[in-house]
Image (tube, rainbow, N blue to C red):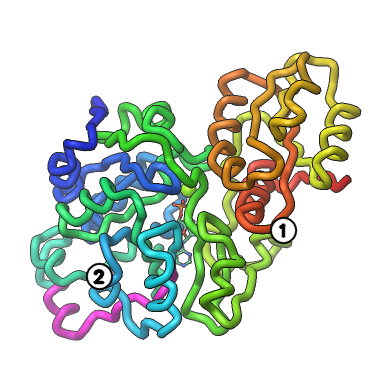
Amino acid sequence: MKTQFLRPKDVDQAARIIRSGGLVGLPTETVYGLGTNGLNPMAVRSIFQAKGRPQDNPLILHIPDASWLELYCEDIPEAAWRLAKRFWPGPLTMVLKCRRRSQEELNQLEREPVCSKTHFGLKVIPDEVTAGLDTVGMRCPAHSICRAVIRTAGVPVAAPSGNLSGKPSPTTAQHMMDDMGGRIDAILDGGDCQVGLESTIVDLTCSPPRLLRPGGVPLEELRVVLEEIEMDPAVTRLMDEGEQPRAPGMKYRHYAPKAPVTVVRGEPMRSAQYILDHISDSYWDGVICFNEFAHWYQEHPVEKLGSSQDCWEQARRLFRALRAMDENGVKHIWAQCPDTSGMGLAVVNRLSKAAGFHIVDV
Ligand code: AMP
Ligand code: MG
């Protein structure tokens, strides 16, 4: 299959492909997504194939505005509306109860072939999206071209990040082509992603609400809207043997470049010094560091993460840096790491997962 590059003016074409069950790379403000018609079970299955993604890892449904929530969810708590009002369109995913199917709808599903028009008309979310859970992750992206595609397609768009499963997420159309070229119908180039890390995921089906994944909306900002929010332990540490993750997707190795990563955590000057003291003489040890320290490692491949003071810049550059390390063919990656305030929490989370939680505290 030849993967076409589409341009922003090709919204109609992208929407047509999605509506008819094809796979399209879509720009969002977080990372590039791999989207298809979220009401078409066959189409959703093909996402898992293209990515090599485990079937029990659910997908997020993308909608053009909050009014679509009630079509697919029920028992929507008041807090969800407050969050949508404050953060949508934007990098926040809410896990909500799926709308239950009425007996009439179930009867109709029995009678109809799986992909018929009627099935779409019923607005039933297939198990392929939710991995069989009775909840669904919903998001309204801030990228206007992405929203235009969804609105034109007229269906919620199921989309995980557009990388091969386990790899760093794509933050440019070219990165997505590198992973998905030949496997999907098209990629719509909407420019570089402004946030650079995935959405924040909050589960609103429990009390208090629970942060499942830190991302483009910092925890501190959620706390302004929610009285209480709990952080899932998987955000900051490796799950213990036998421990059941809250959501299936949380157990998988993620965001990982080819080379092993060692994350060095602590005050920037000290972490930079630690790396300098421990890095091997080999050229094939690469460093991901704050801009201020880049000149310390002139004998090695270096990727700048941004200023140590700017976690938004670090977020924007992290996946690009991990991919660049792969291209350099390094054998080991040393990475400086910010503290967990603001966007730092999401940066630390992705770096820690890329490193399999191989972290040194200095
Ligand atoms: P991504 O891995 O970037 O495709 O984002 C999808 C992630 O959203 C999954 O890995 C899950 O962790 C999370 N997710 C999606 N739907 C649900 C759900 N119903 N319950 C809990 N987490 C979910
Ligand atoms: Mg992903």
Q: Does residue 29 appear in this view?
A: yes
> Is the C terminus in the top left, top right, bottom left or bottom right quadrant?
top right
Q: Give the x, y percent position of residue 150.
A: 22, 54
**Viewer-proximal residue among 142 and 352:** 142
Q: Residue at x 58, y 41 (%)?
A: 313
Query: Which quadrant of the structure image shows residue 88?
Result: bottom left
Amino acid under label 2? Trp
Q: Which mark is residue 68?
A: 2
Q: Is residue 195 above or below residue 62?
A: above
Dot 2: what SS? helix
- Which residue is labeled 1 in the image? 237
**Stretch in magenta:** 94-109
Q: Residue at x 56, y 21 (%)?
A: 327
Q: Give the x, y percent position of residue 332.
A: 73, 27
> Is the N terminus in the top left, top right, bottom left or bottom right quadrant?
top left
Q: Does residue 52 appear in this view?
A: no
